[in-house]
Amino acid sequence: MVLGQQPRSVGALAGSFPISRPAISKHLDTLERAGLVERIPRGRSNLCVVREAPLLEATAWLEFYRSHWKGALDRFALLVETEEETP
C-alpha cells in the first residue's frame, strides 16, 4: 500500500510492512517532523498524507546536482581519454 496514491490510516500503513505499528508510527513521526507527511485527525484515527512540495523541492535540488556532476564527470572522462591517447 503506497501512501503517495491516497491518504492512508496508520493502521493501513502498518499492515503493509513487516514491522510493528509502533515502529511505523515512529517512522511517520520522523517524516512528519521533516515536513514530508501530514497527519490529519479523523475521529479516533489519523490519516497520513504526503506533502508533495518538499519532495518536489528535493527532487529539483537532486536533479541540479545530478546534471552538474554528470557533466563534470563526462568532461573528466574525455580529459582522461585524451591524455591516454597522447604519446
Image (cartoon, rainbow, N blue to C red):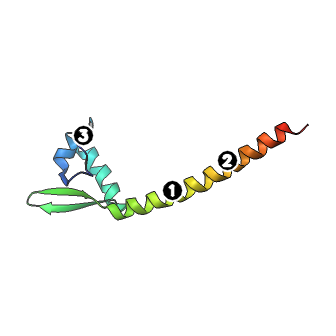
Q: Is mark 2 on a helix, strand or loop?
A: helix
3D distance between C-alphas at marks 3 and 1: 34 Å
Q: Of the two numbered discs 3 and 2 on the same chain, state the one appearing first in sequence.
A: 3
The image quadrant where one finds the N terminus is: top left
Q: Residue 74 carries which label?
A: 2
**Residue found at x 64% / y 52%:** 71
Q: Residue 63 carries which label?
A: 1
- Amino acid type of the residue that numbered disc 3 sits on in the rendered structure: Ser
Q: Nearer the viewer, mark 2 or mark 1?
A: 2
Residue bearing the label numbered 3:
20
**Residue found at x 15% / y 62%:** 41
Comparing 79 with 16, the one in front is: 79
The image quadrant where one finds the C terminus is: top right
Comparing 18 with 4, the one in front is: 4
Q: Of the two numbered discs 3 and 1 on the same chain, state the one appearing first in sequence.
A: 3
**Residue found at x 83% / y 42%:** 83
Q: Residue 87 carries which label?
A: none
**In the visual, does 57 lie left or right of 76?**
left
Q: Nearer the viewer, mark 3 or mark 1?
A: 1
- Amino acid type of the residue that numbered disc 2 sits on in the rendered structure: Asp
Q: How crowded is mark 1: few (under 14 residues within 10 Å), some or many (20 or more)?
A: few
Q: Do the residues labelled 2 and 1 touch (CB within 8 Å)?
A: no
3D distance between C-alphas at marks 3 and 2: 46 Å
Question: Residue 48 occupies which quadrant of the picture?
Answer: bottom left
Q: What element carries label 1?
A: helix
Q: Position of residue 32 (x, y in %)?
A: 31, 59
**In the visual, does 77 lie left or right of 83?**
left
Q: Position of residue 58 (x, y in %)?
A: 44, 59
- Amino acid type of the residue that numbered disc 1 sits on in the rendered structure: Glu
